[in-house]
């Protein structure tokens, strides 16, 4: 008797538990580290801001000199950003510009809209409180504070934060090395004549693009004939110097599907088939020192299983802890009254009214649905939907 299929959650938990972290660190210029994975915690070299400074253009004053709400003070100095301020003389004001150093003795800034310049004097039409519009030294970051944790996938904002504390270089993990190949005698490359019964190999483009988006170094072994010896040979070659092998097609149980026997002959197969739609045939194992993941041949199935399983697996290989995508409860503006016994992932998109529309054809071969849609609607096994109900929605933006 065959074992029951794993649920999507059980399959993901199993995959993540099997991960071996990538080893190998390189140091890059901070500006060249976008989308890389940080290899070690990073601490600030300084306080941010480094000194008390102003949030506004205006006048730095002693709050006690402005108790009347109509104070006329002599302008004793002018302080642009990046210049050293002199101590503020009692009973005077300093003209100051956003980001400039607060002079010693000043404890407030009055914005210029509340002031009226009069030659060498300024009329302060406001009663400031101490600390008004002043950013204190170390208010954002203090010297020695950890600003970025190991395993962080660096984005533009993380690079800016690192630069703001003086980090010119960052240690990052080496890029994952991923081998891909595609099985099926029916596959043809765009630009070649399409023979009867043949199809263009869209998965080669989709999967390579997704891997590149994750920063992987991709070796493409192309289309492999539907033969066991050819599949085994390609697996052996791909297992050298790669962290992960990904295939598309050949993971079903037909006579021309050779992935399973090939992986079992060259390595081990630890997972086979998931109770989800699209994407039931998903294989996981090892060949040599490389992990193996066999994706379905249907283009939507291949796309969805990559997003839900391959992406988090690759991120976890790089030490990223939080690999779960952001999901939201959104109103369904459609009915779905024929639930499946498997976990379904429907392609939908947000409409201008804040609800979700459903692509008309949910077939696993209709790649148009992935372009029209902007996310996946996650339905539990047996779950139907009536218009107006809330459903779990995972936007593509959190999966790519």
Image (tube, helix red, strand yellow):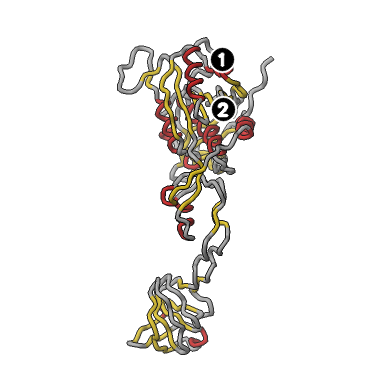
Residue 345 in the image, given as x and y percentages of width and height? 53, 31
Q: Is residue 78 above or below residue 221?
A: below
Q: Which of 7 and 218 lies nearest the eye of the viewer?
A: 218
- At mark 2, the secondary structure is loop
First along the sequence among labels 2 and 1:
1
Q: Which mark is residue 261?
A: 1
Q: Which mark is residue 349?
A: none
Residue 332 in the image, given as x and y percentages of width and height? 52, 39
Residue 191 in the image, given as x and y percentages of width and height? 30, 22
Residue at the spot of label 2: 289
How crowded pointer 2 is (Cα within 10 Å; few <14, some 14-19, many 20+) is rated as: few
Q: Residue at x 47, y 76 (%)?
A: 102
Q: Which of 267 and 196 lies nearest the eye of the viewer?
A: 267
Q: Residue at x 47, y 19 (%)?
A: 234
Residue 353 in the image, given as x and y percentages of width and height? 46, 45
Q: Which of 218 and 248 lies nearest the eye of the viewer?
A: 218
């Amino acid at each position: 008797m065959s074992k029951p299929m794993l649920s999507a959650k059980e399959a993901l938990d199993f995959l993540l538990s099997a991960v071996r972290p990538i080893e190998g660190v390189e140091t890059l210029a901070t500006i060249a580290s976008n989308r890389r994975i940080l290899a070690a915690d990073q601490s600030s070299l300084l306080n941010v801001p480094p000194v008390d400074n102003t949030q506004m253009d205006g006048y730095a004053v002693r709050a006690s000199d402005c108790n009347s709400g109509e104070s006329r003070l002599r302008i004793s100095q002018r302080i642009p950003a990046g210049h050293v301020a002199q101590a503020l003389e009692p009973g005077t004001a300093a003209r100051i510009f956003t980001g400039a150093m607060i002079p010693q003795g000043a404890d407030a800034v009055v914005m210029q809209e509340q002031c009226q310049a009069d030659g060498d004097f300024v009329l302060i039409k406001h009663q400031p409180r101490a600390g008004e519009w002043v950013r204190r030294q170390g208010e954002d970051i203090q010297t020695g504070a950890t600003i970025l944790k190991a395993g962080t996938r660096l984005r533009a904002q993380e690079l800016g934060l690192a630069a703001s504390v003086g980090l010119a270089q960052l240690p990052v993990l080496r890029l994952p090395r991923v081998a891909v190949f595609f099985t099926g005698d029916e596959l043809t490359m765009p630009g070649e004549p399409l023979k009867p019964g043949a199809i263009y190999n869209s998965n080669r483009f989709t999967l390579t693009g997704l891997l590149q988006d994750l920063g992987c170094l991709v070796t493409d072994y192309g289309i492999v004939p539907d033969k066991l010896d050819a599949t085994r040979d390609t697996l052996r070659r791909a297992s050298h110097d790669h962290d992960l092998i990904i295939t598309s097609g050949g993971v079903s149980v037909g006579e021309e599907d050779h992935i399973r026997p090939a992986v079992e002959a060259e390595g081990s197969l630890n997972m086979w088939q998931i109770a989800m739609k699209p994407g039931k045939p998903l294989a996981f194992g090892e060949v040599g020192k490389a992990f193996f993941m066999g994706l379905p041949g249907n283009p939507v199935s291949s796309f969805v299983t990559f997003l839900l399983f391959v992406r988090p697996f690759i991120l976890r290989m790089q030490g990223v802890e939080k690999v779960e995508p952001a999901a939201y409860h959104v109103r369904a503006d459609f009915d779905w009254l024929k639930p499946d016994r498997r976990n379904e992932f429907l392609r939908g998109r947000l409409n201008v009214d804040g609800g979700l529309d459903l692509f008309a054809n949910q077939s696993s071969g209709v790649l148009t649905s992935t372009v029209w849609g902007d996310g996946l609607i996650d339905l539990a096994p047996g779950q139907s939907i009536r218009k107006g109900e809330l459903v779990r929605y995972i936007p593509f933006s959190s999966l790519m």
